[in-house]
Image: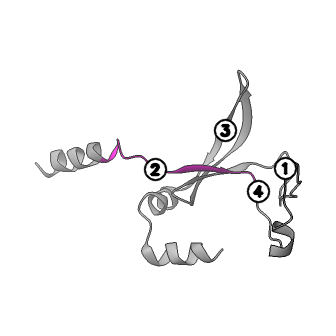
């Protein structure tokens, strides 16, 4: 019977909503530059147009993909998924790891 209990527990989690973010790139800049941002400001990112984007789940890397346009809407075609260990870490983060990621 433990197998049935385990299956029921997983089924309960399948409807849990999680934050999903697509990260196109990142950059670091001094606050004095950030306060001058306005409409039309350009920010140079750390990637080229052809580089894959990162798919983050609850702020942890989960997969990589490429940006696509479908019927005028942006989407991400997943091209690479993290290992099972990385995905588990994404879905069930260790509180110590979470503190480390906040510093980035």
Q: Earlier in the sequence, mark 1 or mark 3?
A: 1
Q: Earlier in the sequence, mark 2 or mark 3?
A: 2
The label number, if any, that marks residue 76 in the structure image: 3
| Residue tagged 1 | 39
Residue 45 or residue 4, whichever sits in front: 45
User: Residue at horizontal 43%, vertical 74%?
Assistant: 95
| Residue tagged 4 | 25
> Residue 77, image x and y in percent?
66, 36
Residue 87 or residue 48, whichever sits in front: 48
Residues at marks 2 and 1, CA–CA distance in whole angstroms: 30 Å
> Residue 52, image x and y in percent?
75, 48
* SS for dot 3: strand
Mark 4 residue crowding within 10 angstroms, few (<14) / some (14–19) / many (20+): some
Of labels 1 and 3, the one closer to you:
1
Predominant secondary structure, magenta span = loop
Residues at marks 4 and 1, CA–CA distance in whole angstroms: 20 Å
The label number, if any, that marks residue 18 in the structure image: 2
Residue 74 or residue 35, whichever sits in front: 35
Residue 53 among those drawn in magenta:
no
Q: Earlier in the sequence, mark 2 or mark 1?
A: 2
In the picture shown, does residue 94 fall above or below 82?
Answer: below
Q: Earlier in the sequence, mark 2 or mark 4?
A: 2
The part of the chain drawn in magenta is 13-25
* SS for dot 2: loop
Of labels 2 and 1, the one closer to you:
1
Residues at marks 2 and 4, CA–CA distance in whole angstroms: 21 Å
Residue 93 relative to residue 60: left or right: left
Image quadrant holding the C terminus, namely bottom right
In the picture shown, does residue 11 fall above or below 95?
Answer: above
**Residue 30 visible in image:** no
């Amino acid at each position: 019977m433990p197998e049935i209990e385990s299956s029921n527990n997983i089924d309960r989690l399948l409807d849990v909503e999680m934050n999903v973010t697509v990260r196109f790139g990142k950059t670091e800049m001094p606050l004095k530059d950030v306060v001058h941002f306005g409409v039309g400001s350009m920010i140079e990112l750390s990637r080229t147009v052809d580089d894959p984007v990162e798919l983050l789940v609850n702020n942890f890397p989960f997969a990589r993909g490429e940006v696509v346009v479908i019927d005028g809407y942006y989407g991400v075609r997943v091209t690479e998924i993290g290992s099972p260990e990385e995905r588990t870490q994404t879905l069930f983060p260790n509180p110590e790891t979470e503190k480390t990621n906040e510093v980035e």
